[in-house]
Structures are given as structure tokens and as C-alpha cells.
Amino acid sequence: MIRPFRGVAAAGAAGPIPSPNIWNWPEVYEQENAAQDVDGAVWTVLREVAPWAGADVLDVGCGDGFHLPVFAAEAASVTGVEPHPPLVERARARVGDRARVLRGGAASLPLPDASVDLVHARTAYFFGPGCEPGLAEAQRVLRPGGLTAIVDLDATVPPYGRWMRADLPRYDPARVESFFERQGFSMRRVATVWRFPDRAALAAVLQIEFSGAVAERAIAETGGLTLPVGYRVHVRRKESFLAP
């Protein structure tokens, strides 16, 4: 079964979509987080298009809180929201008093109206259509002028995107990008490098992200310890929201 999607933030009224990779293998996913974007290219773009210094930040689908300390170093306040109880506990243990972590889903955020300046969601909104309830909740909790920043893997960029599409043949990156454009988001493509400490870590990560056959192929096609991976950064300011 394909496992590249952190689905917690994309949920509708039926509840969060499970994320088999981090929900089932949090220790391996920690290795994945450590390997991702080692040069900080995504963070550089986020600082340009959605700066958070002095802001109240919400990280939707925060998982075990890996990204919360980066925001906490400069933000006025940081809140992580995550539906999976074991990950909530891991995130709280990670951040201590630097951030608060609440249990909840994107379609029913446990925050009041107009209470944050930035809503961040990373690898959570891959499928576009269907995540409207989560996007509406992001609008609700944002203050006027606030930003929603969605960071997703770019399935148009090989080799990772090719492996994604092999496991999800019905996934259409162009359709997803068009969806976000209609919703009023701008988009930046970001080229990154994943770097692993050894081949065992690389193999373990690819095995939780893809089906057996595709993972085997991905491991064989990846020479050395680095992997180029593309991302999309979608950003929308509250005032610029366009109804579909």
C-alpha cells in the first residue's frame, strides 16, 4: 500500500485519514525527517513567502513535533495539532514548554476564531479536492492578513515523484495544483536533497513510504546516500481567498 501521504490535515467531516508511515513507524519516520531537505531549501522559501518571526503559528498535522522547534525559535507562540494520540505525546515530550500540542483534526481545529497569523501544514494536503473542510478551518482560525502555507511533495519531479505515481496511478499532480490555484494559492517549486547516514536508513525510509515492489525498485535505483526530492509550497493570504 502506498504510504507517502501524511493525510491528517486533509481530512473532511469523516475524520482524519491515517498516515501509515509515521503512525506505524515513528522511529523510522524520525530518520526520514532528519534526512529531508538537508540544505534547508524549503525553510528558505517559507521564510520568504510566510515569515513567522513574532507570529502566532499553528502547525496542522504536526506529527511528533519535528518542525515545531524551528518555529518556536522565532515565533511569539507555536501550537501543534495532531489527531493520533501517541504522536501527540511524542510531540509534547519533544517540545516541552516551547510549544503546546493539542489533539485534533484539520476539519475541526481546537482553536478560536482569528487566533493565529500562520497556518502551516507539511506533507498533508496531497490530494487537493476533498480537503476543503481543512482549508475552511484554516481560514477561520487565521487573523486578517494571516497566511496558510502548505508544503507538499512534488510528484512531477523524478525520481521520487515517479515512484509516487507508480503507487498511485490515479494521482494527477496537475489537477491538484489547479485545485490550489482556484482556491487562491500561489505556488513555488522547491528542489531539495535528502541525505541519509547509511544505506540501511535509506532503505527503511523508502520501505515505509512505498509498496514493496516500488520500494525495492526505489532502493535499487538510488545510488549512494542522497536523493533529490521536489516540493511545492502553496501560500494564501486570508484577504485573497477566492471561493471556488
Image: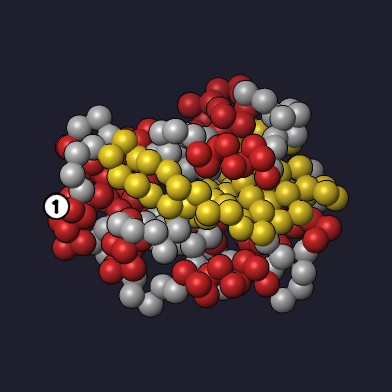
Quadrant housing the C terminus: bottom right
Horizontally, residue 177 falls left or right of residue 220, namely right
The picture places residue 173, in percent across and down from the top left corner, at 47, 69
Amino acid type of the residue tagged 1 in the rendering: Ala
Quadrant housing the N terminus: bottom left
State the residue at coordinates (38%, 41%). Answer: 193
The picture places residue 141, in percent across and down from the top left corner, at 76, 51
State the residue at coordinates (63%, 61%). Answer: 134
Q: Answer with the quarter of the image where residue 96 lies.
A: top right
In the displayed structure, would residue 193 be above or below residue 148?
A: above
Q: How is the image coloured?
A: secondary structure
The picture places residue 7, in percent across and down from the top left corner, at 47, 58
State the residue at coordinates (34%, 50%). Answer: 21
In the displayed structure, would residue 151 be above or below residue 14?
A: above
Residue 25 in view here = no
Badge 1 crowding class, 10 Å Cα cut-off, few under 14, some 14 to 19, many 20 or more, is few
Horizontally, residue 38 falls left or right of residue 113, namely left
Residue 50 in view here = yes
Secondary structure under the numbered disc 1 in the rendered image: helix
Identify residue for label 1: 220
